[in-house]
């Protein structure tokens, strides 16, 4: 990325700065190109790194749209733009609207609902809904998590309505109470250290079929490096899963043990609480079919922090402890990380008004749902 484009993004601090920076369509296109192709243009069809710009209407030549390029490979010759093979593929919206919407969603601490985003941008609610899913698809990360990794689970969904005519739910597998809620597996990576400037670790979550060892292993094997230091509670599935990694420690919540030196799962439980509060306060309800995409957004926002230092804080009982202080990455600079992973992740509109996700990379938690659903993922 050129220093001019980086400076333009760095100077965006307020909503007024954002409106000024994204007011020109040509400027927005060049900003998007610098974010999608930080090391130069790459053909999205074959990966060839040389291409030519086709003279368009902006240069008084043939009737080609501005920003159209052609691959220089003799076997390809594919014509593309910066939005080709991305969630913005074949978009009818101006790029300025896309960038404004992305900035507003990243500026909000817990996200922005499609209703409020539609009001801010002057678009329809279904359009704002698809814009939100485009951000969530690009925010997904695929690299393995190493270092110290915490794993836990929680249930997604509200309390079912009680019908006095129905029998009590009773107990299910291993004595656990039966529930209609959806189980979710959560993985959180701790930061490497607490020196100023250290970024926060990644956080990922996905809907799973159950809380068995098989489900936990399937969710973790593609996300956690075998050399990682795994931490969990005393759940049987997690204890058995720990044998697959270099080190594994647990805390016994049943014995009221929550922290033992550096052994705890407070980070992953904090992320669980963030997910619950985001859903309750912003989106109010998400379906299990779309939950993984929402988890991508919440996990990405969790990782967009850097350590600024440490300070002494007192607990309720007067005990002093060192607390790490964090600073959030500005939303305009978060766009760099969002669009860097845009190519290869496509999102199309389905005939029934939903979305169809086609990803060329394996996205954590992207399960193949029935075709009748408004969302399904094709992993190629």
Image (cartoon, rainbow, N blue to C red):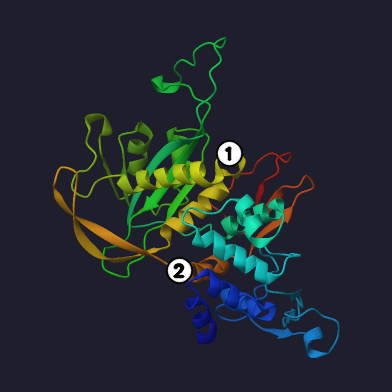
Seen from the viewer's position, the closer of residues 242 and 63 is 63
Tell me if mark 1 has few (under 14), some (14-19) or many (20+) residues whose alpha carbon lies within 10 angstroms of its own.
some
Would you say residue 343 is visible in this rendering? no
Q: Where is residue 147 in the image (x, y as percent from the top left)?
A: 32, 57
Q: Quadrant of residue 81?
A: bottom right
Q: Is mark 2 on a helix, strand or loop?
A: loop
Q: Which residue lies furthest to the right in this view?
A: 62
Task: From the viewer's perspective, tell me whether residue 247 is left or right of residue 76.
Answer: left
Sequence-earlier tag: 1 or 2? 1
The residues tagged by marks 1 and 2 sit, at their Cα atoms, a distance apart of 30 Å
User: Is residue 158 shown above or below 8?
Assistant: above
Task: From the viewer's perspective, tell me whether residue 106 is left or right of residue 120.
Answer: left
Residue drawn at 67 percent across, 73 percent down? 82
Would you say residue 10 is visible in this rendering? yes
Q: Mark 1 points at which residue?
A: 288
Seen from the viewer's position, the closer of residues 247 and 315 is 315
Residue drawn at 52 percent across, 54 percent down? 111
Q: Position of residue 173 (x, y in %)?
A: 44, 22
Q: Name the residue under label 2.
A: 330
Q: Where is residue 161 in the image (x, y as percent from the top left)?
A: 55, 22
Tell me if mark 2 has few (under 14), some (14-19) or many (20+) residues whose alpha carbon lies within 10 angstroms of its own.
some
Count the numbered circles shown. Answer: 2
């Amino acid at each position: 990325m050129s220093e001019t484009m980086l400076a333009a993004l760095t100077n965006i601090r307020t909503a007024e700065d954002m409106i000024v920076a994204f007011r020109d369509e040509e400027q927005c296109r060049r900003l998007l190109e610098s974010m999608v192709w930080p090391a130069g243009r790459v053909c999205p069809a074959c990966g060839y790194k040389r291409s030519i710009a086709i003279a368009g209407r902006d240069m008084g030549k043939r009737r080609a749209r501005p920003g159209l390029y052609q691959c220089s490979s003799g076997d390809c010759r594919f014509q593309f733009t910066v939005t080709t093979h991305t969630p913005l593929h074949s978009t009818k919206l101006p790029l300025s609207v896309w960038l404004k919407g992305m900035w507003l969603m990243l500026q909000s601490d817990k996200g922005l609902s499609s209703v409020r985003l539609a009001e801010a941008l002057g678009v329809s609610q279904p359009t704002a809904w698809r814009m939100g899913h485009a951000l969530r698809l690009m925010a997904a990360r695929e690299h393995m998590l190493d270092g110290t990794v915490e794993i836990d689970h929680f249930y997604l969904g509200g309390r079912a309505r009680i019908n006095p005519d129905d029998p009590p739910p009773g107990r299910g597998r291993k004595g656990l109470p039966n529930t209609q809620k959806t189980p979710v597996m959560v993985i959180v990576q701790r930061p490497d250290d607490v020196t100023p400037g250290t970024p926060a670790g990644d956080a990922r979550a996905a809907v799973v079929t159950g809380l068995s060892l098989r489900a936990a292993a399937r969710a973790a094997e593609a996300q956690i490096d075998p050399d990682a230091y795994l931490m969990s509670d005393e759940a049987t599935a997690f204890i058995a899963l720990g044998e697959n990694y270099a080190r594994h420690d647990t805390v016994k919540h049943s014995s009221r043990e929550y922290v033992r030196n550096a052994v705890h799962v407070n980070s992953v439980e904090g992320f669980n609480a963030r997910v619950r509060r985001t859903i309750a306060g912003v989106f109010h309800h998400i379906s299990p079919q779309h939950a993984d995409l929402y988890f991508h957004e919440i996990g990405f926002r969790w990782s967009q922090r850097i350590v600024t230092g440490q300070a002494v804080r007192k607990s309720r009982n007067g005990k002093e402890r060192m607390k790490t202080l964090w600073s959030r990455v500005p939303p305009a600079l978060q766009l760099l990380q969002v669009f860097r992973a845009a190519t290869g992740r496509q999102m199309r509109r389905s005939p029934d008004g939903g979305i169809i996700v086609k990803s060329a990379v394996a996205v954590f938690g992207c399960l193949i749902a029935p075709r009748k659903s408004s969302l399904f993922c094709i992993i190629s």
